[in-house]
Amino acid sequence: MATTINEGTPVIPTGRSRRAKVADSGGRLAALLLSPTMLVLALVIGYPVLAGFRESLFTRGEGLDADGFVVEGERFVGLDNYAAIFSGDRATAFWNAFGNTTFFTVTTVFLETVIGVAMALIMQRAFRGRAFVRASILVPWAIPTAISGLLWRWIFQADGAANAVLGTDILWTADGPAAKTAVIIAEVWKTSPFIALLVLAGLQMIPREVYEAAQVDGAGALQRFWRITLPLVKPALLVAVLFRMLDVLRMFDLPAVLVGVNQKSVQTLTTISWFEASNLRYGSAAAYATVLFVYIAVISYLFVKLLGADIIGQAREVRKKPATKAGAKTVRKVAA
């Protein structure tokens, strides 16, 4: 209802109120457009997570009830499956798998990041045969993981290429530290190109004028890398590292094909969960899977919160800075 200041003079609604109405209508439209996606996510992600957690609270098979009678079928056991894997009869296997999962994640992601950044810097340079080099670097990423595991298993045989080149008789695919090394080498070889590809996309977003200004100010190659390349490519690098962390935490097929599922040195949370499920212990398998889900969620949250809280905003800021005089001065100051 319009009000009046003077008699017969209506007050026109302010621009702020109009903007609020537009924002409300835009929010409703966005919610309507996103509702199919949210429904699919709820069915594909939400329901399996809840179903897995529910399964972890039950056990199947024969057992004894509180009165000592034999019962069959599904029985509610509450948190007994979690107590068993943390401090019960399955605690040793769980902590071994947890340690292997963490070790593989830290080691492989660190090596992949270093090698991937080096690959991206090589692929960015202009030289004859650059297209062939780019294609060669990306070939390992295109090979299916199971096929890659079979390839490296042939290389790491007792009479394989690895021992022939090194002049040793190491049993790479047996249980022990050598098996860990074989899995790390195969994983790094396959997935370093993934980080290289994302970092290369970030490098191509950096204007050439930034490097020219830094070079005019006397910055060397190492200074340009640490103070210009690395900070400006940080958004793409963080995304690549996060994706690789999520993949390695869920790693199953490579150690299973290359070494084996029941080898303690390469047993991960996914392999032990699969082993429990294959032996019809679905409750404990679901408990392992739920713990792994929580572990991945916590690691992802801490990684994004501490290192890349505003990845999109950082990328936009990086693109805007060189376009202004203030941004150019900042680049020169950093390069100096």
Image: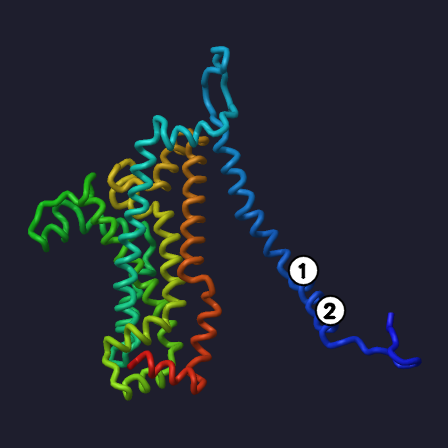
List x then y, in percent, for residue 63. 45, 18
Give, as a three-letter code, the residue at label 2: Lys
Circle 2: element type: helix
Q: Residue furthest left?
A: 167
- Asked whether the residues under the numbered discs 1 and 2 touch, taking CB atoms below 8 Å apart as contact, a structural biologist would say no
List x then y, in percent, for residue 291. 42, 40
What is the crowding at mark 1: few (fewer than 14 residues within 10 Å), some, or many (at least 20)?
A: few
List x then y, in percent, for residue 42. 58, 48
Earlier along the polypeptide chain: callout 1 or callout 2? 2
In the rendered structure, find residue 21 and report the number of the disc placed on it. Answer: 2
Q: Quadrant of residue 30?
A: bottom right
Q: Quadrant of residue 62?
A: top left
Q: Residue at coordinates 10% horizontally, 55% vertically from top-left?
A: 165
Front position in the image: 20 or 81: 20
Circle 1: element type: helix
In the rendered structure, find residue 269 and report the number of the disc placed on it. Answer: none
List x then y, in percent, for residue 141. 32, 60
Kindly identify which residue carries mark 1.
32
Q: Residue at coordinates 33% horizontally, 83% vertically from top-left?
A: 332
